[in-house]
């Protein structure tokens, strides 16, 4: 039951809206990965690790939609955007 506009509403069998961050179970990060784990992001490389070999090097990337920079293995970068 939920109170909406001073009326009690039985939620069962209704379609509802909610934020991903409010999911209690399973972990909301698991839900996000299931929904968007294969989405392709675009960002600007701001730094590279000095791993020496391609398999052990990483790129630090700024993505507009992400608050923090992300770290991605160089060999997982899909291509360069022009």
Image: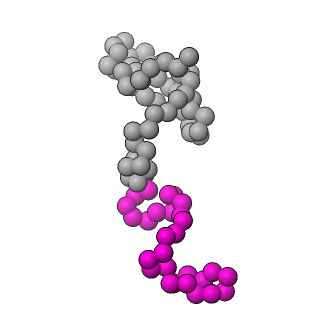
* Render colour scheme: one colour
Q: Quadrant of the C terminus?
A: top right
| Image point (32%, 19%), residue name | 55
Residue 46 at what x, y percent from top left? 56, 21
Residue 55 in magenta? no
Residue 12 in magenta? yes
| Magenta span | 1-29
Left or right of 57, for residue 14: right
Residue 1 at what x, y percent from top left? 51, 84
Above-or-below relation of 68 to 2: above
Left or right of 5, for residue 15: left
| Image point (37%, 49%), residue name | 34
| Image point (40%, 58%), residue name | 27
Above-or-below relation of 79 to 34: above
| Image point (44%, 38%), residue name | 39
Above-or-below relation of 80 to 29: above
Is residue 14 at least partly visible in the picture? yes
**Closest to the observer, 71 or 17:** 17
Left or right of 55, for residue 81: right
Left or right of 8, for residue 20: left
**Closest to the observer, 77 or 40:** 40
Residue 68 at what x, y percent from top left? 56, 37
Above-or-below relation of 23 to 11: above
Quadrant of res 52: top left
């Amino acid at each position: 039951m939920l109170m909406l506009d001073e009326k009690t509403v039985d939620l069962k069998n209704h379609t509802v809206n909610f934020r991903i961050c409010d999911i209690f179970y399973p972990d909301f990060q698991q839900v996000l990965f299931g929904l968007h784990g294969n989405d392709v992001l675009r960002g600007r490389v701001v730094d590279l690790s000095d791993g020496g070999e391609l398999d052990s090097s990483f790129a630090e990337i700024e993505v507009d939609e992400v608050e923090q920079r992300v770290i991605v293995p160089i060999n997982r970068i899909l291509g360069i955007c022009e």
